[in-house]
């Protein structure tokens, strides 16, 4: 992977396809092994990203919020509190763009408000509550909710779907650009959305989304799309499953777990993708659904399925898969050399199958 990265875009600092994704990989390897060398390698990539912030985007995966959030965490783990706080300060300076009511910023995870919210919650998860103040988080959450309410009223769906979202004038369903990713973020405990809003607005919106699923158990890429084709984290069951599992945790209703299990069966049947091995629209990303379901249910069937998907990825070159544009990146990376697959492999290892390969 390191050899391949020598030809990567030196100006791409994103978590999705750039240096921050590599920093996250080494941070995960440090968590699993406690080897300080991995943390120092993560720092090398953090420094590289912080020199290349461009101010064009503001989210964790595709914008400046990602490098700043990961930088804050890595410096914190190295006990460099001054540098860590400087990253947080710069992260919070992005907030004016996020909460501006006149902004045309979307709400989705890759390029919108939910993606910025992820960065704030990531910092608090890694560094402890209070690293980012609750008022900053609440301001972003309120902006996401108000945006969803506004579109729902405009589309005359307020009763059926109180929180409705769109990206490029299309009402996407999936995790990357759609409702599933936004609802998932609003249900995070650290987002501190009040119970009334969760029950009266988020829950019926999730149910509206559930009722749009295909007979197969898969989900459409958008509300207007009737083609049951995509089985990716970004579009389809592999992304929606995480929202359903979170809904089960929050609302304690079996229907959400049943639907999540149904999604997992779709992924098991159709989730080995010739499109590649990456997280966003590849087999590794689909495999994450099994790891999450295993953690929720402790049913080793799902750990087994995750391992079988991993074995398929390790047979690089045998399946005629496409080569992505950024083959060593976190979200598009391929085979054993890709950061995305290595990150997933570390997660499988930490889930309890330490003898796997």
Image: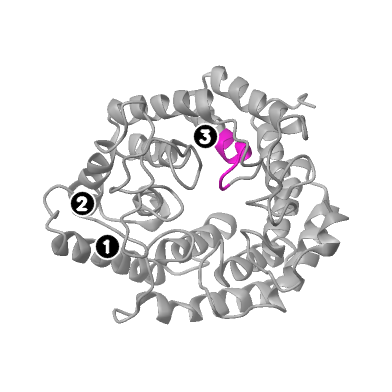
Circle 1 SS class: helix
Identity of the residue drawn at 14% across and 53% down:
157
Task: Assess whether residue 336 is covered by the magenta stretch.
Answer: no
Label 1: few (<14), some (14–19) or many (≥20) C-alpha neighbours in 10 Å:
many
Q: Nearer the viewer, residue 190 or 303?
A: 303
**Residue range corresponding to the magenta coloring:** 280-288
Position of residue 356 in the picture relative to residue 307 (left or right): right
Q: Position of residue 357 (x, y in %)?
A: 80, 27
Q: Nearer the viewer, mark 2 or mark 3?
A: 3
Position of residue 73 in the picture relative to residue 46 (left or right): left
Identity of the residue drawn at 59% across and 23% down:
305
Identity of the residue drawn at 70% across and 54% down:
329
Q: Return the mark for residue 201.
A: 2
Q: Return the mark for residue 181.
A: none
Circle 2 SS class: helix
Q: Position of residue 303 (x, y in %)?
A: 60, 24
C-alpha span from label 1 to label 3: 27 Å
Assess whether mark 1 and mark 2 are in contact (beta carbons under 8 angstroms).
yes
């Amino acid at each position: 992977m390191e050899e391949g990265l020598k030809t990567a875009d030196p100006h791409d600092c994103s978590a999705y396809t750039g240096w921050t994704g590599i920093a996250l990989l080494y941070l995960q390897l440090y968590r699993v092994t406690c080897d300080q060398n991995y943390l120092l390698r993560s720092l090398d990539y953090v420094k590289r990203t912080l020199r290349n912030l461009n101010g064009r985007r503001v989210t964790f995966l595709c914008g400046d919020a990602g490098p700043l959030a990961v930088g804050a965490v890595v410096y914190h783990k190295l006990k460099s509190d001054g540098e860590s706080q400087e990253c947080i300060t710069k992260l919070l300076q992005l907030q004016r763009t996020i909460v501006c009511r006149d902004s045309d910023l979307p709400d989705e995870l890759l390029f919108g408000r939910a993606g910025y919210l992820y960065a704030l919650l990531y910092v608090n998860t890694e560094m402890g509550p209070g690293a980012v103040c609750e008022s900053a988080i609440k301001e972003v959450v309120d902006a996401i909710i108000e945006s969803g309410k506004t579109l729902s009223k405009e589309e005359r769906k307020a009763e059926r779907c109180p929180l409705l979202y769109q990206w490029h004038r299309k009402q996407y369903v999936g995790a990357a650009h759609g409702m599933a990713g936004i609802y998932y973020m609003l249900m995070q405990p650290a987002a501190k959305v009040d119970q009334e809003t969760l029950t009266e607005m988020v829950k019926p919106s999730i149910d509206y989304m559930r009722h749009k699923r295909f007979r197969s158990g898969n989900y459409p890429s958008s509300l207007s799309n009737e083609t049951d084709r995509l089985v990716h984290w970004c579009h389809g069951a592999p992304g929606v499953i995480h929202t359903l599992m979170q809904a089960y945790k929050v609302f304690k209703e079996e229907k959400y777990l049943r639907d999540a299990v149904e999604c997992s069966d779709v992924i098991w049947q159709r989730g080995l993708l010739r499109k590649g091995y990456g997280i966003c629209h590849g087999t590794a990303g689909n495999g994450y659904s099994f790891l999450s379901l295993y953690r929720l249910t402790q049913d080793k069937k799902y750990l087994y399925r995750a391992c079988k998907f991993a074995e398929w990825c390790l047979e690089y070159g045998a399946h005629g898969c496409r080569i992505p544009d950024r083959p060593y990146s976190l979200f598009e990376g391929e085979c054993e050399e890709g950061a995305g697959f290595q990150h997933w492999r570390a997660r499988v290892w930490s889930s309890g199958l330490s003898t796997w390969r």
